[in-house]
Image (cartoon, rainbow, N blue to C red):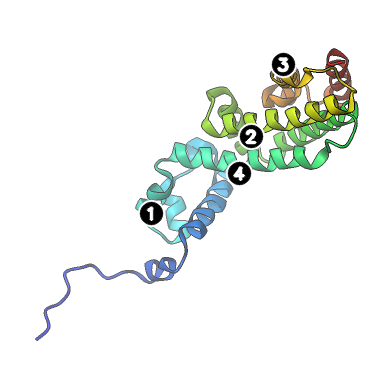
Amino acid sequence: MTKPSTFPCSSNEDVRRARHTPQQTTREILIAAEGLFAEHGFAGMSMSGLAKQLGMSAATVHKYFGSKRGLAEAVCGLELERFAGHMEAAISTEDGTAVALERFAIAVLAYNSGFASPTPKIFELYVFAAQSDWTVFRAFRERVVHLLSKVLQAGEVRGDVRVGAAECVEQVFDGFSAILHPLVVRDFRYQGGGRAPALARFLYQALQ
């Protein structure tokens, strides 16, 4: 007579989920977590509730993201990825530097202003990431600095900014912090429309 297996049987959910690739599972967790963070915020989001919603164990969620903080950072990274993509799509290095910087400023302000209203709980994560220097925010900053560097390097080639202007990219980024930092935008969102292009023009003049 065959001895019964000592291993526990897998649930139907485990069998179904076993067919998913790690990348698919990661994405599925992130999308569901983003919805729960948006609804409940960091304090109110439950890892066990997330696992139950997805039909998986809490251990599986922890396996992929380690902790609620790790999951929150990954969710924040999704939004920062969208933000960076929005900025990159708004400008072209083929434009003159003045035009590129102004379009950059307008795109940043438009995205930040709209972001603060419809998803306030995710906005809280965004603010915390900026203030706590999360890894995803450092990566976001590096991506934005790289984008601005490309604009300035193209401007040097065209001759519409001085030679060496690209070396000032960190200062240019700091100059744009008045519209890049989420709290500043939230507090001055109704005053920013005219200030963003004016800030871009001011920085451009400093680079000539």
Question: Residue lying furthest bottom in this view?
Answer: 1
Pick out the residue farthest to the left. Answer: 1
- Toward which corner of the image does residue 146 lie, by quadrant? top right
Quadrant in the picture for residue 131:
top right
Q: Earlier in the sequence, mark 1 or mark 2?
A: 1
- First of labels 2, 3 by sequence position: 2
Residue 23: x %, y % from top left: 50, 57
Label annotation for residue 171:
3
Q: Which mark is residue 123?
A: 2
- In the image, which disc is placed on residue 60? 1
Residue at image position (17%, 74%) is: 5
Answer with mark 4 or mark 1, whichever residue precedes in sequence. Answer: 1
Kindly report the distance in space between the C-alpha atoms of the residues bearing marks 4 and 2.
12 Å
Helix, strand or loop status at disc 3: helix
Mark 3 vs 4, N-terminal side: 4
- Work out how far the residue at label 3 is from the one at label 1, CA to CA, in angstroms: 43 Å
Give the spatial CA distance, label 4 vs label 1: 20 Å
Residue 202: x %, y % from top left = 86, 15
Q: Residues within 10 Å of mark 4 (few under 14, many from 20)?
A: some
Secondary structure at badge 1 equals helix
Q: Amino acid at mark 1?
A: Thr
73 sits left or right of 88 in the view: left
Is 94 above or below relative to 158? below
For label 4, the residue is 78
Q: Nearer the viewer, residue 152 or 84?
A: 152
Mark 2 or mark 3, whichever is nearer to me: 3
Look at the numbered disc 2 and give the secondary structure of its residue. helix
Residue at the image point whose x is 46% and y is 39% from the top: 70
Q: For mark 4, give the secondary structure.
A: helix
Distance, label 2 to label 3, CA atoms, is 26 Å
